[in-house]
Image (cartoon, grey):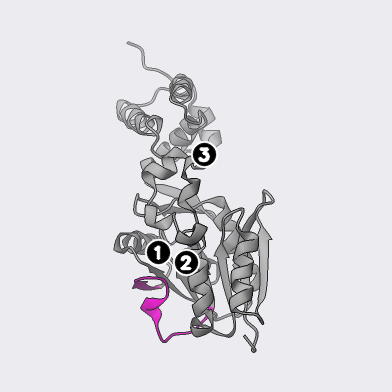
Amino acid sequence: MAKQTVLAILQAAKQQLQMAGQDPELAQYLMLEGNQWRFTELVQHYREALSPTQTQAFQAQLARVCAGEPAQYVLGYAPFYGREFQVTPATLIPRPETEELVEWVLQVVQQPTAKVIDVGTGSGAIAVTLKKERPTWLVTATDISDAAIAVAQKNAQRLTAQLTWATGDLLAPVTGQRFDVIVSNPPYIDRTEMPEMDTSVKRYEPEQALYAADHGLAFYQRFAQVLTTYLVPTGDFFAEIGYHQGAAVKQIFKQALPDAQVTVKSDINGHDRMIHVHLTSKG
């Protein structure tokens, strides 16, 4: 039996994905990433045959994606801010909206030696990226999950980012310390939103990193109560928020910190997605 070309394998894979109710373009993503090809290299290989080992690996990955598993978990890594981060079911898959949060932090914070903490670091995408983009910053990363911290540490080591690590709930692991910047992508999904969520997210991504009580607002309420304890008097807090939570989250911080400057920022799609709280010397 003649070996199939890369193009023929891709075309068949797209049909399989479509029949399974998955995005057909994931076939090309798997082929590119699995072979570490750029798109131009893929085109150059179109008329060639994959080796039996390559074909077997691709078909195994394709079967998992057809079953609904996120391609990033299948491959074991995800892109973020121009770098590759290892991801496992112990960590959320980094998303483009979070890149926008990182960009906002980098634009606003000008101190050359800022002391920064990423709370709920997951794969370490935020913390490692901030350290790589601002090597003179002192960056700490925390998570309640030992498994997530282990993944984040591997990412930091592979990307040569020197961070400080702590395991525990919210800011408890750094009690007694103060920071110039606190950044977080906390759980913010209300469980009543589950019917609207992507099936693969519900099935494969870690629950404790997704859902929060009080209509998804619990972590913002907790942060609002402790920011003046863990930030310097003119410190900054940045967080990702749900697309419909802008007004509610802003109200939480304005009520707890009347003198603070609170700004909600939209993402590239025009949805409320980030919040910035800047403390003044009064509050």
Q: CA distance from mark 3 to mark 1?
A: 25 Å
SS for callout 2 = helix
Say if the magenta span includes residue 259: no
Residue at 62% across / 54% down in the picture? Answer: 244
In the figure, is residue 198 to the left or right of 97? left
Q: Quadrant of the C terminus?
A: bottom right
**Is residue 72 among the parts visible in the rendering?**
no
Report the mark closest to the observer, 1 or 2.
2
Q: Who comes first in sequence, dot 1 or dot 2?
A: 2
Q: Are marks 1 and 2 in contact (CB under 8 Å)?
A: yes
- Badge number at residue 38: 3
Q: Which residues are magenta?
A: 164-180
**Is residue 207 among the parts visible in the rendering?**
yes
Q: CA distance from mark 2 to mark 3?
A: 27 Å
Q: CA distance from mark 1 to mark 2?
A: 9 Å
What kind of residue is marked 1? Ala
Q: Find disc 1 in the rendering and name its residue.
A: 156
Query: In front here: 2 or 198?
Result: 198
Q: Who comes first in sequence, dot 3 or dot 1?
A: 3
Say if the magenta span includes residue 173: yes
What kind of residue is marked 2? Ala
What kind of residue is marked 3? Arg
In the figure, is residue 31 to the left or right of 261? left
Residue at 34% across / 59% down in the picture? Answer: 151
Q: Find disc 2 in the rendering and name its residue.
A: 127
The x and y percentages for residue 96 are 56, 51
Please say if 136 is above or below 216. Answer: below
Q: Who comes first in sequence, dot 2 or dot 3?
A: 3
The x and y percentages for residue 149 are 34, 64
Q: Are marks 3 and 1 in contact (CB under 8 Å)?
A: no
